Each structure stands twice: as structure tokens, then as C-alpha cells.
Amino acid sequence: MAAPALATAADESFSFGLTPVFLDNDMNLLSLLQAYLAQQLRRPVELVKRRTQEEIWVMLRSGRLEAAWVCDLPYVEHAEQLALLAVPIYRGRPLYQTYVIVNKASNIETFDDIRGTVHAFSDPDSTSGYLVTLWMLALRQTSPVRFFREFFFTYSHRNTIRAVGSGLAGSGSVDGYVWEIMK
């Protein structure tokens, strides 16, 4: 979670941006997050969702959001403009994982086996949904254009999972947390 500056007026609503890593159907989690933030800030909290990481970052940078849950890639790229407020804890530690997934019906068993597939990335500003796979390709001295038959962005980890599950993509890069929640 990062913020350019925190407002102080207790009667004004606090705008908090959420990236697509939050699943829309997890209303209980979103309600708990909203209630927790409102209690801690002692003011109403408005949760703001957008389709892409970039949209949240633009809103945060322009002052239309007071704070946001952001991926670590945009945070690192713009750290001079942001203040780190919190790091999420998952399974008792600050755990962050990327899963490269394939349809169960495929014969793919290793990362190298996804060569020549249509690959679904989650978001170009996502560490788990893009950057880690890019790094794995760089270790092989290749790029998405040379490694995959085609690739595209779904702008949501959930949509990447759906694209692979439906056969629209042969492989995909997703956040481990989202995978575990959807599983």
C-alpha cells in the first residue's frame, strides 16, 4: 500500500485504490478491508477499483486517490513519489509468488514446454503477472515475441486463469495469492 500524502480532514472520505489483484466477488474481504481502514483512519473510506494497475497509479499520482494497493513494480519504478505504508502478510510472512499455469488437459510439465504457446499475461505493470515471466525468459536469452507463438494481456489475474482454463491461452502468468483463492 502506498500513498503520495495522507489527508487529515476526519469528516472527508478517504479514497483507497484497489488493483485487479482484489477479486470482485470477495465482498467479505473487501468489506473487512474497508471497515479496518475506516476504523484506523477514523473516517469513511471509499474503495476505488479500476481495470488496470496503470489506472490506479495515474489516479494516485494525480491526487484522485489518497492511497492505493499497488504492485511492487510500479512502487519501485515510482518510489521517489510514494511513501510505503504497509506490506501485506500472507501465510504469516510477506510472501509473493508467481505461478505460470497451463490447462490440465495439456502435456506441458516444465516452463520450457510452454514455448510456442499462446501466453496470457495479467498486466504489464504486474510483477507476478508479467515481470517474473519476463525475467525467466531473459535467463533463457529470449523474449515473449521469440518464445511464445502469441501473447496478450488480460488485465486481471482472474481473467488470465479463465483464458488458460477455457483454452483461449495455452499458458499464463498469475499471482499465487489469486490462484490459491480461486482454487
Image (tube, grey):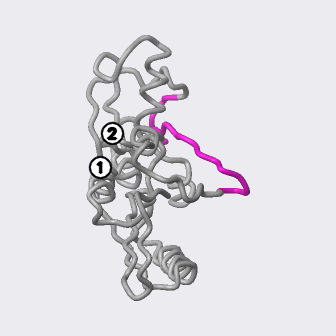
Crowding at label 2, few (<14), some or many (≥20) Cα neighbours within 10 Å? some
Secondary-structure class at tag 1: helix
Residue located 43% across and 33% down the image: 131
Whether label 2 touches label 1, CB < 8 Å:
yes
Q: Is residue 47 visible?
A: yes
**Of residues 31 and 153, the one drawn nearer to the viewer in this rendering:** 31
Q: Which residue is mark 2?
A: 124
**Of residues 169 and 159, the one drawn nearer to the viewer in this rendering:** 159
Percent x, y of residue 152? 27, 37
Asked if residue 37 lies left or right of residue 168, the reply is right
Crowding at label 1, few (<14), some or many (≥20) Cα neighbours within 10 Å? some
Q: Is residue 183 above or below residue 29?
A: above
Residue located 37% across and 84% down the image: 12
| Quadrant placement of the C terminus | bottom right
Secondary-structure class at tag 2: loop
Q: Is residue 93 magenta?
A: yes
Residue located 40% across and 43% down the image: 74
Asked if residue 176 lies left or right of residue 167, the reply is right
**Of residues 33 and 21, the one drawn nearer to the viewer in this rendering:** 33
Q: Is residue 24 above or below residue 83?
A: below
**Of residues 114 and 10, the one drawn nearer to the viewer in this rendering:** 10
| Residue type highlighted by circle 1 | Glu
Q: Is residue 118 above or below residue 149?
A: below
Asked if residue 144 lies left or right of residue 132, the reply is left
Q: Is residue 7 magenta?
A: no
Q: Which residue is mark 1?
A: 54
Predominant SS of the magenta segment: loop
Residue located 26% across and 58% down the image: 62
Q: Is residue 103 visible?
A: no
Q: Residue 48 appears in which quarter of the rendering? A: bottom left
Magenta segment boundaries in residue numbering? 90-108
